[in-house]
Structures are given as structure tokens and as C-alpha cells.
Amino acid sequence: MSQRTLRGQVAVVGVGETAYYKHGQAPEAEITLALRAILRACEDAGIDPRQIDGFASYSNDRNDPSRLAAALGLPELRFSNMQWGGGGGGGSAAVGNAAAAIAAGFADCVVVFRALAQGQFQRFGAAPPAATVSGEQALTFPYGLFSPAQRFAMRVMRFIHEHDIEASAQRAIALASYHHAQANPRAVMHGRPLTEEAYDSARWIVEPFRLFDCCMENDGAAALVLVSAERARDMKQKPAYILGVAQGSEHRNAARGHNAPLYATSSFTTVAPHLYEMAGIGAKNVDVLQSYENFTGGVLMSLVEHDFFTAEEANDFLTLDNLIAPGGRLPLNTSGGNLAECYMHGLELQIEAVRQLRGESTSQVPGAHVSMVISGPMVTPVSSVIFGDAATL
Amino acid sequence: MPSTHYLPPGLPAPVPEPDGLDAPYWQGTRQNELRIQRCRDCRTWLWGPEWICHQCLSFDLEWQRVDGRGLIYSWERAWHPVHPALKGHPPYIVALVELPEAGHIRMLGNLLGDPHQEVRIGAAVEAVFEPHDDAKSPYTLVHWRCVDRSG
């Protein structure tokens, strides 16, 4: 059979989001947010929403494609897909799953979406109310190990120990997101700049994470429209072609009670090589990067595992100057990301990656042709995707 | 009466899984015994509990008592109270401990002693059993404390 690849076959042709809110402050029902984001993405793409024939999402999004299709009056639903796994690890995978469905002929116009209105449901960062726990939770909750920050601090602490990572490395990642958010009017932290001093003096959440190492929690919704590359060429927006996409995690990554054999990783050591193999390029070709910040230490490990620098180079590479647009060596999280634009579970990072290729970012990297997203460090499965403009095909 | 428990009351109590997978572990801790799963066929140590050996795919697993001596593999000091029972409580330390005697599997627990203590990865620790006899379904947690190797 011919070479199996998605490279250049599918493109993102529309992006849309609601206003972004602090958690619990969305003025509308979660599904209304989802519907508004989807309609805005269709408007951006210049298509009738009735052309949608598939949906893909992740992290157990509560808004079932069948309900969305009924609500939107779609003529038919041909593809509905949920990427397993929690956190933001499925963000790029959902884009990949949608693209695969289009390439395989299951559907012609697939929407990737994520909606969150945490005030209407349980928050991620709070312990779920339960008098008793069993299974893996019985090994962690009674010791006060509840939240994602507490779960992942353990991995990052080990990584810091193995590689002598300095506090300034995590700090630079936080500062870069806040820096870019100041140029982005959509950002929840727009007008709220972060200084080194404020970062350093912020309270500990769980060592080695201070307050600004941790993502926000927000309400809102975001959506992307994907079609075949052939169809994308004649549409309203400059297409963002998928060059490569990969998902998964290493050997026994989910071994219970923190028993992953390769412990101090962000779960990408096997995924990243597949990504670059499909894209046919390497880290040195990436012009701009969005890397999911649940916690800054996870971003650090993600960059190492995606070959942007070695763990031993991390302290030198991770400075604010290196991470900011337009001139940094690796402009990172140029919309403000999960730390400072919106914790839209990482789907806002996909939108920003597309805007960079269109030349529409509020912190534009001049002449960006290759735009990458890393989704959900330290969870399993994780995923990442590389987009390119027409010049990269 | 001062509490003999490391963390305040009100945190979730562990109960065995409905399918019985980890019941021998929780029964063991009630007797101050630390029990780890082991494959009868290939002798691989297994943790957390599972129904099949990931090494040789045998379903023939047993529970073996270990001495409970280990080394700190990683740790964290939690400050922000994410559970209502922890509000106003000082920070606390959670340690991830590897057990060289049991195939280097890792176990979690609180690190007893001063919550502000300096923690060293690689430090030797031993298991400490913390009974919760007054719980609706009594259980015992396994914690860790540093041991002085020179002594």
C-alpha cells in the first residue's frame, strides 16, 4: 500500500471562540458556548454551518455530537469522535482524528471543539467530594494528593533533580505567556502583566510550582473547522495544512501509583519522533510553538522531548528573550496560552497556531510557515501537531 | 487529645476496589504488613495492583510481604488546600518511595516529621503504619519516615 500519512491532506479553514471568562462566570449554558464557538468558526471559514458533518473532541467534553447536530439542524452526522484521556492531552489528537476521518472519507467537514463552564460543573483543581475512594485514588487521596498540580509536581520534582533545573527556567515560561497576553485583548490576563518579582514572591501551590506556574481555570468555548486540502484551496481563509500529528504515550505510562518506568517525562518520548517523521521536518524548522501549560515544568519537559533543546541546555535556553515574539529563538505561547489567555483546555493553542500561519496573531512571528502545538504534558495519552502553510507542502 | 494522624480528619477514606483486586494490600496494612503483588511465574514485582503480569502476561499472581525499606524517589510539599479538610492546615509532604527489595516499585505516602524539613531524593526511609480505627470501615495508611543510616 502507499505510504500512510496525513501530511498535506487536510487543513484548518476556520477558527472561532467565545469571549473567555474567569471560571464560573460564563453567562450562558456550556452547550450555548459550544454552539457559538462552532458558528463563529463556520463564519470565519465562510461556510454554511449545515455543511458540518462530523465532530471531534477530547477530555470527555459534555456536549455530545448528536445533540449538537440536532441543535444545529445538520442534514446528516457522519463522524463523531471522542479522544480518550483527561486533561488537555487530546487537543492535537482531536485535530488528528478529525483529519483522519476526512482523509479516510468518513466525513467532509469536521469540527473540533471544546467547551467549559466549570461553574455549572465540578472544577478541575478542587478535590472531588467523596467520603471514600478506591483504586488509584485510594493510593493518593488519603495522603492529600488530589489535584493535577499535586499529581504532576512529583514528576517535575524528579526531573528537576535529575537535570539540575533552576527556578528561572520555569519562570521564563510563565513570563512568556503573560508577556504575550498583554498584546491580546481576548486574554483573561490582558492588562495584568507579570514581573519576575511578582512571580518569585507568589505563594507556593505545591513545590516546585508557585502560583504562576499553574494554569488558570476558565469558562468559554473554542472550535476549528477542517476540510480536505483540495477544498481548502478555494476557501476564504489561508489554509493551515496539517503536516504531521501523533498521539500516545510511553511504555506503561499509566502504571498506577506513579509507577511509570520512565517517570520524569511529559509522556512524549515516543510520540514526538512519530510527529516529526510524518511532518518530514524537525524541531529546527518550527517557526512558532504553542505548548500546553498545565504547569510550567510540563512545558519544559515537552520542549526537551520535542528536541528543541536538551535537558542540560534548559537553564540557558529558557529565558524570556528567547521565548517571545517576534524575535525570540522559539516564540512560545504567543496568545498567552493556558496561563494567561484562557484555559480553553488547550484548544485556544490550536487556534493561535492557525492565526500565526495566517499572519493574524496579536504577537505575530514574521514569516511563520511552520506552526506547532504540543498538547497536555504528563497526562496519557498526549498529542502534538504541526501545521504548515502552502509553501511547506 | 492530639491527633496521631499526619493529616487532619475529613479526607477520603480508602476502601478496597469492588472487584477485590487490592483487598490483600488493605488487609495487610491492618496487620502492619506491607504486601506487594508478585508474579508466580516470572517473579516480577507489580505495583499498583493489576490482574495480569505486565512482564509475562500470567494471571497467576500472589501477594508477598516486604520489609518496607526504601529510598525517596521524588517528593513534593503541598501548600494550597484543595480539600476543605485541609483549610488552615500547615503544608504537608508527600513522598514517592522506591523499594529496591521489591523490584524498585514505587509507593506513595506522607513523609513524617517536620513538614518544613529539607527533603533529599535518595534518602533512606522506612514504612510507618497509621491506623484509622475509628473510621466507619477501619483502615491503615502507610507513611514513610527517614532513617539514620549511620546509626
Image (cartoon, helix red, strand yellow):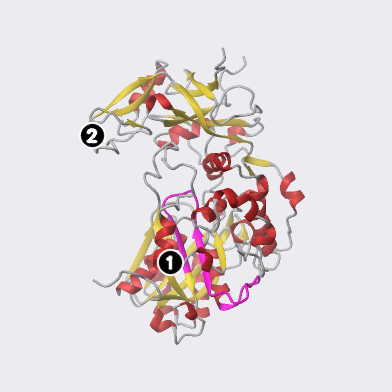
Residue A95 image label: 1
Q: Is residue A67 visible?
A: no
Give the amino acid type for the residue marked by disc 1 in the picture: Val
- Is residue A223 toward the left or the right of residue A318 in the image? left
Image quadrant where residue A76 sits: bottom left
At 49% from the left edge and 83% from the top edge, which residue is drawn? Answer: A46
Front one among A59 and A130: A59
Up/down of A392 relative to A179, above or below: below
Q: Secondary structure at mark 2?
A: loop
Give the amino acid type for the residue marked by disc 2 in the picture: Phe
- Check residue A344 for magenta coloring: no
- Check residue A369 for magenta coloring: yes
- Which residue in the structure is indicated by mark 2? B59
Image quadrant where residue B22 sits: top left
For label 2, the crowd category at 10 Å Cα-Cα, with few meaning under 14, some 14 to 19 and many 20 or more, is some
Q: Secondary structure at mark 1?
A: helix
What stretch of residues is rendered in magenta?
A358-386
At 63% from the left edge and 27% from the top edge, which residue is drawn? Answer: B115
For label 1, the crowd category at 10 Å Cα-Cα, with few meaning under 14, some 14 to 19 and many 20 or more, is many
Up/down of A339 relative to A46, above or below: above
Front one among B116 and A72: B116
Q: Residue B46's x, y, as percent?
A: 34, 32
Q: Chain of mark 1?
A: A
Q: Is residue A382 visible?
A: yes
Front one among A300 and A312: A312
Q: Residue A129's x, y, as percent?
A: 51, 39
Q: Are circles 1 and 2 on residues that touch, CB within 8 Å? A: no
Measure the C-alpha gap from mark 1 to mark 2. Answer: 38 Å
- Is residue A172 toward the left or the right of residue A57 in the image? right
